[in-house]
Image (cartoon, rainbow, N blue to C red):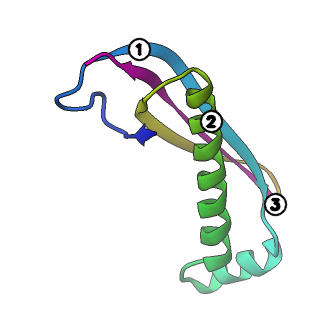
Amino acid sequence: MIIVNIGEIPGRQYEVIGLVKGSVVQGIAKDLLARWQNFLGGEMKNYTKLLDEARYAATKRMAEEAENLHADAVISVTYMSTHIMPGAVEIVVYGMAVKFTD
């Protein structure tokens, strides 16, 4: 599965199948420790690791949705995140599933 954040794949012809998405709500462990780290400054490595894992899971879910539609690629991929409640963040990824015609 080709996944890109550009609006087209150079040199390829394709038809648009439709919008696909994936999302994950990730609990943030050690929230108090992270707040203390934020106060002191520097990277919050636990948050970084958890967000990387959540982005990976959301991307995998989006790719599975595209595969179920028999897509060859997902273009115009966009990631969003939001802090939905204390100790939890939501990661959403979406893009346009396409099928190659060439």
Kindly indicate the quadrant of the structure image that contains residue 49.
Answer: bottom right
Mark 1 touches mark 3? (CB < 8 Å): no
The residue at which mark 1 appears reads as: 16
Residue 57: give x, y in percent of width and height: 66, 51
Give the camera-side residue of 91 and 102.
102
Kindly indicate the quadrant of the structure image that contains residue 31.
Answer: bottom right
**Number of other residues with Cα within 10 Å of mark 2, as a class: few under 14, some 14 to 19, many 20 or more:** some
The residue at which mark 3 appears reads as: 87
Compared with residue 19, is residue 49 higher up or lower down, i.e. above or below? below
Question: What residue span does the magenta drawing correspond to?
Answer: 87-102
Query: Mark number for residue 96?
Result: none
Please tell me how many numbered marks the rendered image carries. 3
Q: Which residue is at 44% across, 36% downward?
A: 77
Q: Report if residue 101 lies within the magenta region.
A: yes
Is tag 1's residue or tag 3's residue first in the polypeptide sequence? 1
Q: Is residue 81 visible?
A: no
Compared with residue 85, is residue 11 higher up or lower down, i.e. above or below? above
Query: Mark number for residue 64?
Result: 2
Could you give the CA–CA distance between mark 1 and mark 2, rounded to whole angstroms? Answer: 17 Å
Could you give the CA–CA distance between mark 1 and mark 3, rounded to whole angstroms? Answer: 38 Å
Is tag 3's residue or tag 2's residue first in the polypeptide sequence? 2
Q: Is residue 5 visible?
A: yes
Q: Nearer the viewer, mark 3 or mark 2?
A: 2
Circle 3: element type: loop
Circle 1: element type: strand
Quarter of the image containing the C terminus? top left
* Residue 90 horizontal side relative to residue 17, left or right: right
Compared with residue 40, is residue 70 higher up or lower down, i.e. above or below? above
